[in-house]
Image (tube, rainbow, N blue to C red):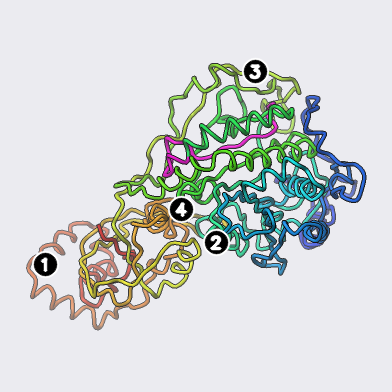
């Protein structure tokens, strides 16, 4: 946004902001708003176009509009109700309520309408609309469910072997904040929804802290149904390239679920890529350019933090795939590719169930001695990833731009391969910690306890009355300058010392459990997605009792008389002129060493047992 705005346009802009909830198109100019020009498209036709139904009683709302629009919340639920009424195999339930009062719906498709929790078949959970402007998964799901209802033989065979669970719209409030100007870099639908939820929180950053009712509802589903494969369906931002369906997951080199990562690499990916290619799509890896001004500099092999679905799924030992359809491809093409992806994933579950279940069970039994909580990017690129098959990119040029006064990338709409495109992997250990046997959380930290239980982490009463544990003290800390996702995040450095404590007021969180790795990520404060760094323990940074000079000064004199070592330490500090000239600092020196000082100040309340 330009920093120079006229008084008249500022007034109009203020009216735009006030009426934002109405979602009427509005700009800071009186003339009609313009759409952002996008790069030229490559022509596309594929076998998946045969999936489209143009006539009859079961045309989906997106098909009825020729994929110009997507149905709203009410229309979506009405179509799903019709599907459920037409087949006993389809069932619906509300799993939660948004802050705006809308219900989040779960659709289950099982053979004979059996309970996916108990029918003994592997389960696929597909989630759409965590970013509601990226709604491809919803419309692909409606088409797939329609085809099942109308007798598609292949789908019926697949559902005989695997269950399908669908969250059609996760961010239901953002879904209703529609408009043609919500997604500048995306080709459709015309009525795309909004990224954040009704409280302006990005649900896609909430997988560890679980602030949003929408994601707590998803976590209930994951804990209850224990899906064997979890698909989180998005649409990209960023560069132009030929791939229309890109996807990824935590790589084995950085995985807390290495056997699952190998199954995703060696079993699932081949099936997905073949199905998509046969249907006329171009599947590819997740693409994050390292330099927006020079794409040929390479891309990053991203290792997701647990605030994201694929990062959390890796810690939970829940096979999780992040789908990112390319935003510059038309909505129609993206929806069709998503349909193919869903069908292929369902087929993979049915065909290779045993090896996946074996991988999940193996990873759940892992009890590592150390755990990496954060990864850095390797500065040395890997040139082998695209050595045999070049990266399928697009041509671009650099041109001086009068808006920025600098050279900018201009995508040319022409295919261009990039052999040996550099890939910079997030495979350098940034934060690695020793895994303890258990953590002990004070019962008074009820919000933290509630979050742990919402994740499904097992919590128990201590079997001992007291124990010698390790406590961390914050030696230095820094708060963020602005809020992020409703929190002022904080980072710190720590020292540790043994403490003997009574355990009457604590609960125990053992790491000897399937979600032990997740417990470490949440409770070790050195991790970037720990509840500490999200601000759940900020109370330790405030002091509520203080000392009056008329009481503290006589106490300090008495302390000097009784403790020669303290006297010597004080005299040494007085050699520092800044300290010597500061009466408050001199008094604090004694207060901090007195028995009256707040012993909980800067003490991380979660204790550790090694």
Marking on residue 21: none
Residue corresponding to mark 1: 567
Of 307 and 229, nearer the camera is 229
**Could you tell me which residue is drawn at 41 percent across and 64 percent down?**
458
Q: Residues within 10 Å of mark 1 (few under 14, many from 20)?
A: some
Q: Residues within 10 Å of mark 3 (few under 14, many from 20)?
A: some
In the rendered image, residue 590, in percent from the top left (x then y), is placed at 21, 71
**248 in the magenta segment:** yes
Circles 1 and 2 in contact, beta carbons < 8 Å: no
**Left or right of 407 on screen, residue 604:** left
Q: N-terminal of the two: label 1 or label 3?
A: 3
Residue 514 visible in rendering? yes
Dot 3: what SS?
A: strand
The residues tagged by marks 1 and 2 sit, at their Cα atoms, a distance apart of 62 Å
Q: Quadrant of residue 41?
A: top right
**70 in the magenta segment:** no
The residues tagged by marks 1 and 3 sit, at their Cα atoms, a distance apart of 74 Å
Per the rendered image, the range of residues in magenta is 241-260
Of 11 and 421, nearer the camera is 421
Residue corresponding to mark 3: 417
Of 36 and 329, nearer the camera is 329
The residues tagged by marks 3 and 2 sit, at their Cα atoms, a distance apart of 45 Å
Residue corresponding to mark 2: 224
């Amino acid at each position: 946004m330009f920093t120079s705005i006229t008084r008249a346009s500022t007034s109009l802009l203020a009216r735009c902001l006030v009426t934002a909830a109405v979602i009427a198109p509005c700009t800071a100019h009186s003339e009609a708003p313009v759409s952002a020009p996008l790069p030229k498209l490559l022509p596309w036709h594929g076998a998946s176009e045969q999936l489209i139904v143009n006539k009859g009683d079961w045309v989906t709302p997106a098909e009825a509009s020729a994929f110009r629009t997507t149905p709203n919340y009410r229309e979506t639920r009405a179509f799903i109700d019709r599907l459920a009424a037409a087949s006993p195999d389809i069932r619906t339930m509300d799993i939660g309520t948004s802050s705006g009062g809308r219900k989040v719906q779960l659709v289950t498709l099982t053979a004979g309408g059996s309970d996916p929790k108990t029918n003994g078949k592997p389960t696929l959970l597909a989630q759409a609309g965590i970013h509601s402007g990226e709604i491809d998964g919803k419309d692909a799901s409606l088409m797939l469910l329609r085809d099942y209802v109308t007798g598609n033989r292949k789908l019926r065979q697949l559902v005989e072997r695997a269950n399908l669970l669908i969250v059609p719209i996760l961010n239901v409030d953002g879904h209703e904040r529609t408009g043609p100007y919500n997604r500048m870099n995306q080709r459709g639908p015309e009525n795309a929804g909004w990224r954040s939820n009704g409280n302006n929180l990005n649900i896609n950053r909430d997988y560890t802290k679980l602030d949003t009712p929408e994601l707590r509802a998803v976590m209930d589903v994951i804990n209850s149904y224990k899906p064997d494969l979890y698909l989180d369906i998005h649409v990209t931002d960023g560069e132009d390239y030929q791939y229309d369906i890109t996807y990824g997951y935590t790589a084995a080199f950085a995985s807390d679920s290495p056997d699952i990562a190998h199954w995703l690499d060696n079993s699932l990916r081949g099936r997905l890529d073949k199905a998509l290619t046969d249907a006329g799509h171009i599947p590819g890896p997740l693409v994050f350019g390292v330099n927006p001004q020079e794409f040929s500099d390479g891309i990053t092999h991203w290792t997701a933090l647990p605030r994201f679905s694929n990062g959390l799924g890796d810690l939970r030992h829940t096979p999780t795939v992040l789908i990112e359809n390319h935003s510059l491809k038309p909505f129609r093409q993206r929806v069709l590719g998503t349909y193919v992806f869903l069908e292929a994933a369902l087929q993979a579950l049915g065909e290779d169930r045993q090896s996946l279940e074996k991988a999940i069970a193996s990873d759940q039994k892992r009890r590592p001695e150390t755990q990496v909580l954060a990864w850095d990017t390797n500065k040395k690129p890997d040139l082998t990833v695209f050595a045999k098959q070049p990266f399928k990119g697009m041509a671009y040029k650099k041109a001086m731009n009068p808006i920025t006064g600098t050279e900018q990338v201009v995508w040319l709409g022409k295919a261009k391969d990039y052999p040996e495109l550099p890939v910079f992997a997030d495979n350098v250990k940034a934060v690695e910690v020793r895994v303890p046997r258990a953590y002990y959380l004070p019962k008074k930290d009820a919000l933290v306890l509630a979050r742990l239980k919402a994740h499904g982490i097992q919590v128990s009463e201590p079997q001992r009355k007291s124990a010698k544990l390790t406590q961390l003290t914050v030696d230095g800390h820094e708060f963020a300058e602005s809020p992020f996702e409703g929190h002022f995040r904080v980072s710190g450095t720590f020292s540790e010392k043994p403490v003997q404590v009574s355990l009457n007021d604590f609960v125990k969180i053992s790491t000897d459990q399937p979600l032990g790795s997740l417990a470490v990520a949440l409770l070790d404060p050195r991790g970037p997605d720990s509840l500490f760094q999200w601000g759940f323990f900020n109370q330790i940074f405030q002091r509520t009792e203080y000392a009056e000079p008329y009481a503290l000064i006589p106490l300090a004199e008495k302390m000097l008389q009784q403790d020669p070592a303290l006297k010597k330490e004080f005299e040494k500090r007085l050699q520092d002129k800044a300290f010597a000239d500061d009466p408050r600092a001199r008094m604090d020196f004694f207060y901090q060493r007195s028995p009256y000082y707040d012993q909980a100040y800067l003490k991380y309340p979660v204790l550790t047992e090694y």
